[in-house]
Image (spheres, coloured by chain):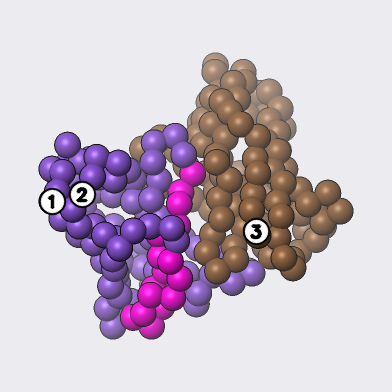
Chain colours: A purple, B brown
Amino acid sequence: DAGVTQSPTHLIKTRGQQVTLRCSPKSGHDTVSWYQQALGQGPQFIFQYYEEEERQRGNFPDRFSGHQFPNYSSELNVNALLLGDSALYLCASSLGTVAMNTEAFFGQGTRLTVV
Amino acid sequence: GNSVTQMEGPVTLSEEAFLTINCTYTATGYPSLFWYVQYPGEGLQLLLKATKADDKGSNKGFEATYRKETTSFHLEKGSVQVSDSAVYFCALPWGKLQFGAGTQVVVTP
């Protein structure tokens, strides 16, 4: 049973460019959440997708957008990259939106470096 | 609002020492509580969880007890190994996972 898979594992982009990160959820999961983890900090919630719609959003600008496909996989898009967007981007999947007792499984992350 | 506060690191220990990482939470209702671990260069792995008051989660020698009266979920291990060196995050789910800032643990031989 494959867990959560993310691609690519590493990426280097230039300021102002756009980037797309991909995530396939754990088998049987239908909800995908994205987190940004800056170096030395805890993960910060970006948004969550369920039934192909954005259900919740954290405190991130509109430059961060996403999509969920019918097979539950998801993409995170970041436009007009800033140096401060350099971070580890984590995808987490769960069955249903994260409620009081929901367990989430994380991928290995995509390390984005903006130069 | 819901939040998690955990002790700052880094925590440096010798092998076979006792480890405690404090975590307290503020939450509406009684959500599950989680400890996640992040090994160097990797994503997060669920270490253990507890779903209700007085529940004890355990895994790989680590334990944490859900204490409603003190709103705490402290992580403990009786004898750490070098391989336990990692960053540990306390988290609670409420629409999204809310993480503490993380506690880096360094175990030396």
Tag 2 residue: A81
B4, B21: nearer the viewer? B4
Residue at point 14%, 48% (across, down): A16
Q: Which residues fall within the magenta stretch? A: A42-57
- Labels 2 and 1: the sequence-earlier one: 1
Tell me if B9 is positioned left or right of B63 in this view: left
A51, A72: nearer the viewer? A51
Which quadrant, please, contains the N terminus of chain B? bottom right
| Label number found at residue A17 | 1
Neighbour tally class for label 1: few under 14, some 14-19, many 20 plus, Cα within 10 Å:
few
Discs 1 and 3 share one subunit: no
Name the spot of residue A97 as percent of width and height, x first: 50, 74
Tag 3 residue: B2
Name the spot of residue A30 as percent of width and height, x first: 41, 77
Whether the magenta-drawn stretch holds residue A60 is answered as no
Q: Which amino acid type is shown beneath numbered disc 2?
A: Leu
Q: Are marks 2 and 1 in contact (CB under 8 Å)?
A: yes
